[in-house]
Image: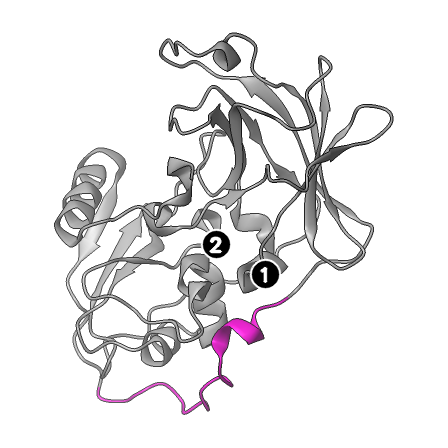
Amino acid sequence: MSSHDSLGVGRVAATVVAVCVVGLVSGCTLLAPPTPSTTTPAAIAPDADPIAQQLPNLLVAGQTIGTGTLRVVDHEPISKPVAEHPLTGTVRIVVRPDRGIEVRIRPDQPADPSLAGIDLVLTGKRHDGGPENIQIQDQRIFPLNSGANSAESDGELVLPLETDAASLGDPTFLHSIEESPSGDARVMAAAVITWTITPAFPELKAVDRGSVKNAGGRVITDNGTLAYYVPKPDDTIYAVARRFGLTETQLVWLNPELANTSAPQLRSGVGVNLDPARR
């Protein structure tokens, strides 16, 4: 199994220290919890369970929903033959007839359809300089090369994404394709994905209504924009979502890693994203 398949294990202390360091150099501000309000947000019924089933699905069979170019990236020397000539070429992300996703790569040079010796994954990590999601270490990566790989007669490689993750109904949180030697975490080539579908909530903006019961944690801003929320032990997704004028589904959409289980839960001290640009 590739090292990409394992989940990152973020720790509370590391997260808070990292955020504070970023704040010192980039204008990030860690705010104390607002003064408890005397009123609570308007009562809204909780979303139907499970929340993951409420996530939007934008996939339409036959559509090309993303493009990119797989290019060699700067990396330390790797003493493996596959690192001498990494797979490069143009990339298309296509919705299959069953509304699953497949990645198609047209190699710059003829390639082995088995892709022996390399691992390819879709990931939320960024190679375009955009802001990373605070939960990036917890986001699952999605392996591409499996026994189902094939090649078209014109040489285009077809790599199905074998997963039923609910978050993939709007896959725009996946920003890159990364290529590494099998069993080696070092990235030797990457593609920045340009999505051609509009995200499910393009106008979404969190607004802090102030601390309330089960949503009394800290807010972190970046240049005046609500960036992250750090939960307290008794916080709930329902209360936190309402504090920021969101539905539970929208909060999980902002944090796809929360959709990894049928009953998403917040973790005390581990920040969640509030900014669509950081999704």
- In the rendered image, residue 200 lying in the magenta stretch gets the answer no
Spatial CA distance of label 2 from label 1 is 23 Å
Label 2: few (<14), some (14–19) or many (≥20) C-alpha neighbours in 10 Å: some
Residue under the point 30% across and 46% down: 8
Which residue bears the numbered disc 2?
A: 276
Main structural element of the magenta stretch: helix, strand or loop? loop
* Residue 32 screen position, x and y as percent: 15, 62
Q: Nearer the viewer, residue 61 or 30?
A: 61
Query: Range of the magenta residues?
Result: 38-56
Residue under the point 36% across and 85% down: 41
Q: Is residue 223 above or below residue 245?
A: above
Residue 125: name its quadrant: top left
Label 1: few (<14), some (14–19) or many (≥20) C-alpha neighbours in 10 Å: few
Q: Is residue 118 above or below residue 92?
A: above
Residue 262: name its quadrant: bottom left
Q: Nearer the viewer, residue 252 or 88?
A: 88
Q: Nearer the viewer, residue 98 or 79?
A: 79
Horizontal placement of 96 versus 134: left or right? Answer: right
| Picture disc at residue 136 | none
- In the rendered image, residue 47 lying in the magenta stretch gets the answer yes
Which residue bears the numbered disc 1?
A: 164
Q: Amino acid at mark 2?
A: Pro
Query: Please, which residue is most extreme toward the right here?
Result: 153
